[in-house]
Image (tube, grey):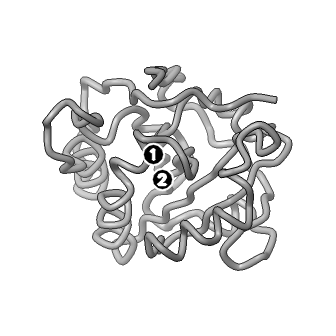
Amino acid sequence: MSRTPSNMIALNTVALDFKLMDTVSDKELSLQSLKGNKATVIFFICNHCPFVIHVNDELVKIANDFQHKGISFVAISSNDVENYPQDAPHLMKKVAAECKYPFPYLYDETQEVASAYDAACTPDIYVFDKDLKLVYRGQIDDSRPENGIPVTGKDLRQALQNLLEGKDILKEQKPSIGCNIKWK
């Protein structure tokens, strides 16, 4: 397993708009149509990465816990499907159904969105406020496959709760660690 960290782009970076195909609904969706009233969480994931598989259930729980509070969640896969066919759109749709994703699972075929966001790994997590300014980027929690630490979503949950309560977002933001995005 490779261990690639997030690039940790500058806080207050404005989210770039995009239009990508949602593998769940088979509709093209834009960031503007998906953004939440209070916040928008964008995470880069894929089907085969053991780091993503390790946190999938918690991502679903976090989305289910916070969506009704005005926070939207958007998953994007940007991997090269020629060399990693297990990440192909029809299989993304299957994984979304199996995992009961309560959010769209978008396919970034050109990899332009991952590049624009300076995404480096899966999972790579970005939290934007209601004005689409970056307030958190980094890990879900300290758990990794095989490190024995339970998956709790502690860091991401705390960032979202602080945002909702108008508190400072986490001062210490640790990079996510995962498989590198599979570039073409």
Q: Is residue 106 above or below residue 115?
A: below
From the top left corner, tell me how far across and down residue 64 is, in percent.
Answer: 34, 73
- Under mark 2, the amino acid is Val
Picture quadrant of residue 154:
top left
From the top left corner, tell me how far across and down residue 104 is, in percent.
Answer: 60, 68
Identified at 71% across, 41% down, the residue is 84
The residue where tag 1 is placed is 127
The residue carrying pointer 2 sits among few (fewer than 14), some (14 to 19) or many (20 or more) residues within 10 Å by Cα, namely many
Give the number of the disc on residue 73: none
From the top left corner, tell me how far across and down residue 44 is, in percent.
Answer: 56, 44
Q: Are marks 2 and 1 in contact (CB under 8 Å)?
A: yes
- Under mark 1, the amino acid is Val
The residue where tag 2 is placed is 41
Identified at 80% across, 58% down, the residue is 19
Q: Residue furthest right?
A: 110
Q: Is residue 154 above or below residue 68?
A: above
Q: Disc 2 and disc 1: Cα gap in Å?
A: 4 Å
Left or right of 92 in this view: 72: left
The residue carrying pointer 1 sits among few (fewer than 14), some (14 to 19) or many (20 or more) residues within 10 Å by Cα, namely many
